[in-house]
Image: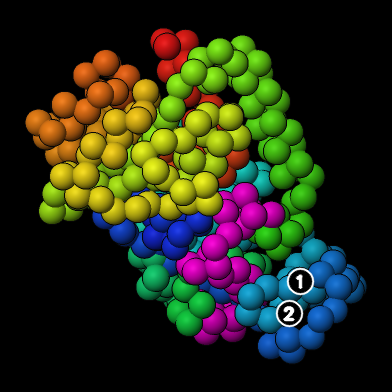
Amino acid sequence: MTRSAIPFTPVKRRAFLGGLAGAAAALGLAACGVSDSGDDEKDTKESKGGKEGGEQGTRSIKTDNGTVTVPTKPERVIACENWDTLMLLDLGIVPIGIPDGIANAAALPADVYQKLRDVKTIGVAGTPNSQAIGALKPDLIVDQFYKDKTAPLKTIAPVAYYNWSDSGALWYEQLDKIADAVNRRDALTDAKSEYRRRLAEVKGAYAQQIAKTTWAPLSGGQNGAFFLGSPLLTVMRDLGLKIGAKIAKDESGFVQKSYEELEILDDCDVLLYPQLFDGKAPALTQQLLDNKVWKGVRAVKAGHAFPIQHYTVGSYRWANGAVDEIEKILKKL
């Protein structure tokens, strides 16, 4: 989704279409021993005796690739995609293997970058390196995008695959599934609670500004195009912000438009566009910002077009960062 930024795999409508600047760079990962039984046993069914004969027990979980036997509480987890990586961090797990390119200081908050900077990489997203994965001795592999590529990795470790590419699921729905796979529901409960607390705090403090304004998120695209929408919309709606620019109520992905259609933004009082954590806009978004048609948009002329670094929300850490940034904007209105 960005060139110099953290690359995200595109997800179809209502899911994450992922992409700060509009280039779709993917992240690949590996899988762990999948049970192809496909039976409908209870997700949390547990048994004694771990795969390696240690004290760690196992449990059966339902995935989109059948029922899989996984460790009761996995510790050595591989993330096949950038989204997987950020979700695992929400759950208190630093993956032992991540896709190439995610540990990018310009694309990540400093605290997230510090956690990932020394993690081993396992190939680019969509092209998992089985040798690199095997060398890390994982006990679980998490994947949401590359079913065919990660299925063979079940000879290394169990693969928990949850289809996000075309499922229509939102990020927090996928995160619930990942929490089940790694048996970290308590951590997810804490993350949700903090998010809800911050939502209530900001909604209460800025009720007047929220009530009187209309908002839209957008980013630059290739060949004179821009994208309306972002996973950021989930947070904007949770804050009670009115969404304009004819963005559908169930839309949380990216809808491509041409520069000639920028007038669709004229009902908006506030516009949000992506910014990297080094303070620069992604290249394609910068092209949009430099265009004279953009400079004539009503909200832009009013000085109400704002950069936001947590533009591609995919975890509660990211969602809370977005709430913080939107709060700063609300203070200015």
User: Which residue in the structure is indicated by mark 1?
Assistant: 61
Residues under numbered marks 1 and 2 in contact, where contact means CB atoms less than 8 Å apart = yes
Q: From the viewer's side, name the closer residue of 203 and 25.
A: 203
Name the residue furthest left.
292
Q: Residue at x 45, y 22 (%)?
A: 213
Residue 318 sits above or below residue 304 on the image:
below
Q: Label 1: state its secondary structure.
A: strand
Q: Residue at x 84, y 67 (%)?
A: 44
Rendering coords of residue 19 (x, y %): 35, 50
**Quarter occupied by the C terminus:** top left
Residue 203 sits above or below residue 157 on the image:
above
**Residue 317 shows in this picture:** no
Question: In the picture, residue 55 is in which quadrant?
Answer: bottom right
User: Which residue in the structure is indicated by mark 2?
Assistant: 67
Region rendered in magenta: 150-176
Q: Is residue 167 magenta?
A: yes
Q: From the viewer's side, name the closer residue of 108 and 257.
A: 257
- Please indicate whether residue 183 sits to the left or right of residue 159 in the image: right
Q: From the viewer's side, name the closer residue of 38 and 149.
A: 38
Tell me the number on the disc at residue 310: none
Residue type at the position of mark 2: Thr
Q: Residue at x 37, y 23 (%)?
A: 269
Q: From the viewer's side, name the closer residue of 159 and 115.
A: 159
Q: Residue at x 23, y 37 (%)?
A: 263
Rendering coords of residue 170 (x, y %): 57, 54
> Of label 1 and label 2, which has the lower sequence position?
1
Rendering coords of residue 327 (x, y %): 51, 19
Name the residue furthest bottom.
37
Report, in whole angstroms, how far the alpha carbon at label 1 lies from the one at label 2: 6 Å
- Please indicate whether residue 83 sits to the left or right of residue 188 in the image: left
Question: In the picture, residue 235 is in which quadrant?
Answer: top right
Rendering coords of residue 14 (x, y %): 50, 56
